[in-house]
Image (cartoon, helix red, strand yellow):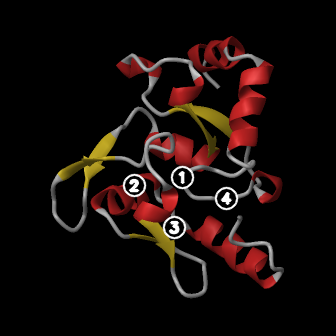
Amino acid sequence: MNWALALWHMSLTKKTKEAVAQRAGYCCEYCRSQEKFSPSRFSVDHIIPTAKLGEDDLANLCYACQACNNHKYTNTATTDPVTGENTSLFNPRLHFWEEHFVWNEDKSEVIGITPIGRATIVKLKLNRSGVKNLRVALKKLGLHPPE
């Protein structure tokens, strides 16, 4: 972890981090992975990155698995693979997940049903193989998708 990131992590209080995690139900607000089953750490993500003048308030924070957070990086928009037009990424504070995404039949893949959904799936790699495999295993145990 670089020093700037380490200092940023210290700037958010433990209470704030817990509030963000609890609000998200301890699930990644992008790929819907459940923290308790994840091999990687979860973190608090600035939806509008601090590098783009995003604030530290709860309205700009979401809970994300490390992979989604890494793929998102400082991006807030990307290209919709269907229309080729620039569109914003999914914002968990402004958008409802169910309005932009659905699960495929076996619940192993997220399908984008809007430009925001499709663009977010591609940019954050929401259907990466590891998370798809975990979804299949958890579905068999009755633990996926999260509520």
Residue drawn at the location 59% of the way across and 26% of the way down? 58
Image vertical order of residue 41 relative to residue 124, above or below: above
Query: Label 4 vs label 2: CA separation?
Result: 15 Å
Label 3, secondary structure: give it: loop
- Residue 21 falls left or right of residue 54: right
Label 2, secondary structure: give it: helix
Farthest residue, direction bottom: 105
How many residues crowd mark 1 within 10 Å: few (<14), some (14–19), many (20+)? many
Q: Amino acid at mark 4?
A: Ser
Identify the residue position indicated by label 1 in the image: 30
Query: Label 1 vs label 2: CA separation?
Result: 8 Å
Q: Are marks 3 and 1 in contact (CB under 8 Å)?
A: no
Name the spot of residue 76 as percent of width and height, x first. 35, 38
Q: Amino acid at mark 2?
A: Thr
How many residues crowd mark 2 within 10 Å: few (<14), some (14–19), many (20+)? many
Of the two numbered discs 2 and 3 in the rendering, the one whose residue sits closer to the viewer = 2
Q: Amino acid at mark 1?
A: Tyr
Of the two numbered discs 3 and 1 in the rendering, the one whose residue sits closer to the viewer = 1
Q: Earlier in the sequence, mark 1 or mark 2?
A: 1
Quadrant position of the C terminus in the picture? bottom right
Query: Label 3 vs label 4: CA separation?
Result: 11 Å
Q: Are marks 1 and 2 in contact (CB under 8 Å)?
A: yes
Identify the residue position indicated by label 2 in the image: 120
Of the two numbered discs 3 and 4 in the rendering, the one whose residue sits closer to the viewer = 4
Identify the residue position indicated by label 3 in the image: 127
